[in-house]
Amino acid sequence: MTLGGIVTPRNYNQVIKFGDLECDIPEGSTECTIVVNETFYDKEAEGQKLIPFTVTDPYSFINDETDDFEYNFDFRPPKIIDVHVNADADMLPEVITDYGDAVVLYHNQAAVAVESPHDSSDPLFLPTDPTLKITKNKALHITNTVNYGGLNIKFNLGDIVGADDVMLAPINNPLIMGKNILYVYDFTQIKDGLYDFTFSTLDGNGNGEEKAVKDVYVDRTPPDIQFVVNGRQHTSSSSALLYSISDLTILSWGGWVDGSRIESAKLNGEDISFSSGTDNVKRLEYLELPPNSINALEVTAVDAVGNKISKFLDFKFGSYLFKHKTQPVMAEVEPVNIDLSQSSGLYCVMFSDPDFAKMYSSEHAGEVTRGCTIEWLETPVGLDVSMPKSLSRITSRIGEGKLQAGNHGYAFIVHSHDAFGNVMAVYEGQGIIEVLPLQAPILNVGKPHIYNNYPEDYKYTNAADYNLTFRSYAETAVNADLVIELYDEANQLIYQRNYPSARGKTNTLFTIEDTLPLLAVSQYKVKAYYAARPDIFSEKPYYVYTVPGLSVRLHLEHATTIKEGDTFTITARLGKRASGEISYLPEMGIWNIGLYRFDQIAQKYLPLKDPVKTDAQGKANLLISADEMLINENRVMAIATLDTPYPEVDIKRMANSLFSVPVLSASGISAQLTSNVYTAPVPARFITRLEYETDIDQNTAGEVVWQKTEDNGATWIEVARKKGLNTFLFSLDAPGEILVRAVIKNRLSEDVYYTNTVKYVAFEEALIELVGSQLVATGAIGKYSYVLNDFALGNLQGQVEWSVDNKLTWQAMSENESLDIDTAMDLQVRALIQDQVNPPFYIYDTMTVSIIPPRQLTGLLTATTNRAEIGDVIDVKGRIVSSRLYDEGEYRYEIVLPDGTTVSDLTVNHTFVASDFINDKATFSFRSWINDMKLETISTRSIYITQIIYDDLPPTNVEITNPERVNFSYVYVRLKKPLAWKLPKSVEINQEIVL
């Protein structure tokens, strides 16, 4: 119990005495507090006490009258009369009339009625509010996931797992009805489930009692409805896709077995019955819907309490798309096939028995396949439809067989079977099978471009040193059994091959390894027929003419040169070369050999003369004049053609050694020297070329001797000698002149021919060069100088001059000049030269100076550390790293210290003070710019120095005092001191150990 005392303020200290307790009130104050601590050990204690109290001063000079303070105590606990919990299934209010006045207890409310231990109606004497503890009964398993056929279905029930224990206080002031007091609680916050309600009037001392209501079901949430479509839970907001009503399963669940059930369903607004299932799992009765129709399903579910929910599902009733095909076939040899392919819907797996189709659909529920059967309405005689065959995932062969020639009609229906035995017709097909009379295979032998354009007796060629290979091409009925045979010239079968189920076009490669007679025709025959009817066949001949092998070549024998005006004799020979000898045999054949030129327009070789036949030794002599060689520029080809009675046999051999036979001149050689440059400053280089008047002149030229003279032809010096040396480089490294010529020897007569003489002059040249800044920043200073070569320096008259106004004015130029550059310009420099040969003349050089607009400089700022404390000294350095477009004297810079002062220097030594650090950081900045262009070129770089702050510093000394008693011979003392790097530099560690 706590008492508060209030008195009239005085100009002295006052004291309130309460029994043995008192409290002081300072001068001028009016209040103080007295805490009364009294322990009662009797739980049933009740009664009253009188305690005297008065107001006085600390010395009891003032004594007011003493009054008695009365307080009552009653520790008797209230008794629980009854408890009420309204969690009824009907959700209606409960009217309580057991305590006099009627009290309405709403759904999700509980109440406890207690009997007060005394008759006082004062609220101050009411007992402590009772509590309601709601405890989850874990015997009830609550879940939002149910396993259906191995598929975990999740229901949208929200957060259905509540707290294990919930403690509630009353929601109202106590309702006092005589000695009875009613407290009401609201438990709408707890989740649905099974709970124990425990009402308690126990206080902190254990006074009071508890009363429990066991196994109270709280069920306020309706069950949820989920749809399983084709074996998968449909969670998407988009429409579902069904191919049969049986593909849909409806499930409901309320979190536990709460009596929920699927009550009704409507399809497109009409009531629809359920075919089978339990209260929580239903399937709709079977019915067929129009393909591609959009349908709306409404399902209603309710639980035992009466919570009801309706849920909707939009679904499209899918369609099956099939197509079937047959193709014309040939009677007796080609089977008829009816193939059924599917492009939409659940893919049909064909069965001959409906029970097997139903079993398949049941075992593969949830997949994209369905068991199907075929009902034949019309079946041709000879067509086997007893067992459909699967060719791929989407294609089945539903009928096959061999039919008689003619047209045969057929018709069938495809039925889809679901897992529950429901059957739906998904496709109807019909058509006519065209069966053609039997015909022999179409056969061709050889190469397509030949047998399509030439008669059958065309003679193919084959070299004697190669095996004979050729092909046959047969066009047949599809899937018919084909036989290909090869016969030799004596009509003997030498090769046979069977092709079961040929694909319509079959080619066969034949290889003959036998040696065939040279220069003779060999005949073969290819035969093709169906295995079922050998008597109906096709056959084609193949003729081959055997020619000499590639080792038989054309060889030419002739002189290596030909003189102008002469006639050239060529001996052409056919045969094999071995050990340098050419051998010829009669079986190598007779050849026609001629000389040809290639016509670029016609793109073929044209004869220069009539060909000549080879003699018994395989030789032929050919003639060609030097003029003909010149006219054709030596591009004369010798071609030998094999002489045969068959025009289609075109075998040639070619030789081109005449390309390298030059035509030589019988008279002199006409040539002259040329050059692009005849005078040049030293060091001078002169390229001299020897140019011939005609090709004959160049062909006739033998050894070339290059000569020069430095004494105007008195003495000629040989500088080079070589055949075909038609270009030579002469060098003059000093001023002077030379004469050069070439001496050419004739290859035929060894006569010598001299070319013209060429004069080369090398002279000294005066040169001046203007050097300096070609790229200058605006407002910067350009630096310039000039360079004279030795000749110019030795013959310089007066001073070097330069112009900065495009040669309007000239002024003397020193060796090093500086110029303020404000705009782009041309600079010129000149020098007056007086040599011993020419009259005085100027030499010039020009430089174009370009301007770069002003731009910010690039500065760097560095420091000796990035962490410091007050009192530390730091070195800060600035540096400008911009390209050297400006002179260093034009740079301006300053370092800004943490206090804002500036130093116009690149280096600063600074000692830190407390005011340098703001938010534990000190800032240094480096600013740089170009003189008179601060706004355009200024740049700022900053660095930050972090302040070192020491928090929670350890003590600066450690002391161990004498122990009162020592029981051991040795006393070990370890002094633990702080790490040095964690201490300020100004701290000293004092340590003392007293034992």
Image (tube, rainbow, N blue to C red):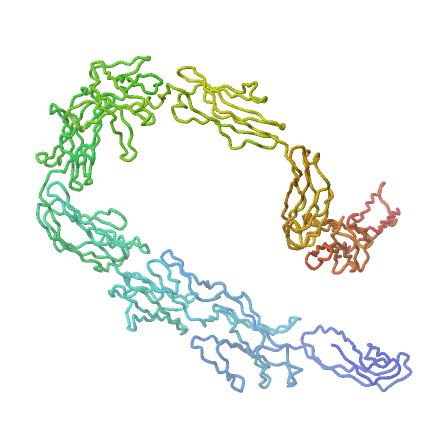
Q: Nearer the viewer, residue 412 or 225?
A: 412
Residue plotted at (51% across, 74% down): 188
- Can you say which quadrant of the picture contains the N terminus? bottom right
Say if 363 sits above or below 291 in the image.
above
x, y percentage for residue 315?
Answer: 32, 65
Q: Is residue 409 left or right of residue 580?
A: left
Q: Quadrant of residue 677?
A: top right
Residue 803, how many percent across, how many down? 68, 48
Q: Quadrant of residue 257?
A: bottom left
- In screen coordinates, is 545 left or right of 316? left
Q: Nearer the viewer, residue 582 or 129?
A: 582
Q: Is residue 643 above or below residue 442?
A: above
Q: Residue at horizontal 46%, vertical 62%?
A: 141
Left or right: 226, with 911 as reference point: left
Please count the marks in the image.
Answer: 0
Q: Is residue 813 left or right of residue 352?
A: right
Name the residue nearer the viewer: 959 or 701.
701
Compared to residue 714, the image places residue 913 above or below, namely below
Rendered location of residue 576, percent (x, y):
28, 16
Q: Residue at x 51, y 23 (%)?
A: 741
User: Which is nearer the eye, 89 or 878?
Assistant: 878
Q: Please state the horizontal and vertical placement of residue 199, each as a whole percent of the image.
A: 56, 73
